[in-house]
């Protein structure tokens, strides 16, 4: 566990009624991308079911299978709509986060936050890129998060 987990400063997210830590704010990108990936996988599974409609329709009585086929198609459309909405939200959030990171004066802090929250590198990879000891990277991360909080830059 990194040493930033105890950070209690709150980051006011534009357009949101709640406050979250800078780390929580930055972590949203990764969480949304994982959600999109999961929905895409589920949608691919449903499309496979639809493409194998002959098997679906012959396994059960006709009236039940038609409903099942229709339900699958509706689920696919729902997933497509939700994925599109999440991708739009993700693009906006990435721009906001990139802008917030850009406003930090320290180049090392900027790079660290970009590597962690926009490129999803793990701590060892970040340590290698920055050429710093892993524990020092944790300390830099804490300082970078503090600079991200409005008024601390």
Image (cartoon, helix red, strand yellow):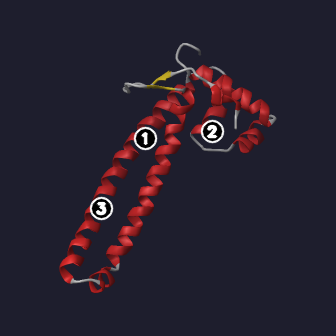
Position of the N terminus by quadrant: top right
Q: From the viewer's perspective, is residue 41 above or below residue 103? A: below
* Residue at screen point 53% across, 43% down: 30
Q: Which mark is residue 151?
A: none
Q: Give the residue number, with chain letter if any, for mark 1.
A: 91
Q: Is residue 104 visible?
A: no
Image quadrant assignment for residue 6: top right
Residue contact between numbered discs 3 and 2, judged by CB atoms under 8 Å: no
Q: Name above or below for residue 150 compared with residue 38.
A: above
Across and down, in percent, residue 42 comes to: 41, 62
Reading the image, the residue beneath label 2 is: 116
72 sits to left or right of 112: left
Provide the secondary structure element on which disc 1 rests.
Answer: helix
- Which badge, 3 or 1, is on the more N-terminal residue? 3
Q: Earlier in the sequence, mark 2 or mark 1?
A: 1
The image's mark for residue 75 is 3
């Amino acid at each position: 566990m990194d040493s930033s987990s105890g950070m209690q400063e709150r980051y006011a997210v534009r357009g949101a009624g709640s406050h979250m830590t800078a780390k929580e704010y930055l972590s949203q990108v990764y969480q949304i991308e994982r959600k999109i990936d999961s929905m895409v996988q589920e949608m691919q599974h449903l499309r496979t079911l639809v493409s194998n409609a002959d098997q679906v329709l012959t396994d059960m009585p006709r009236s039940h299978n038609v409903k099942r086929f229709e339900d699958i198609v509706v689920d696919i459309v729902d997933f497509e709509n939700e994925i599109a909405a999440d991708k739009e939200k993700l693009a906006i959030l990435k721009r906001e986060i990139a802008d917030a990171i850009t406003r930090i004066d320290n180049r090392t802090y900027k790079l660290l936050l970009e590597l962690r929250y926009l490129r999803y590198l793990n701590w060892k990879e970040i340590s290698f890129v920055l050429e710093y000891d892993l524990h020092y990277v944790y300390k830099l991360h804490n300082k970078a998060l503090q600079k991200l909080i409005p008024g601390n830059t």
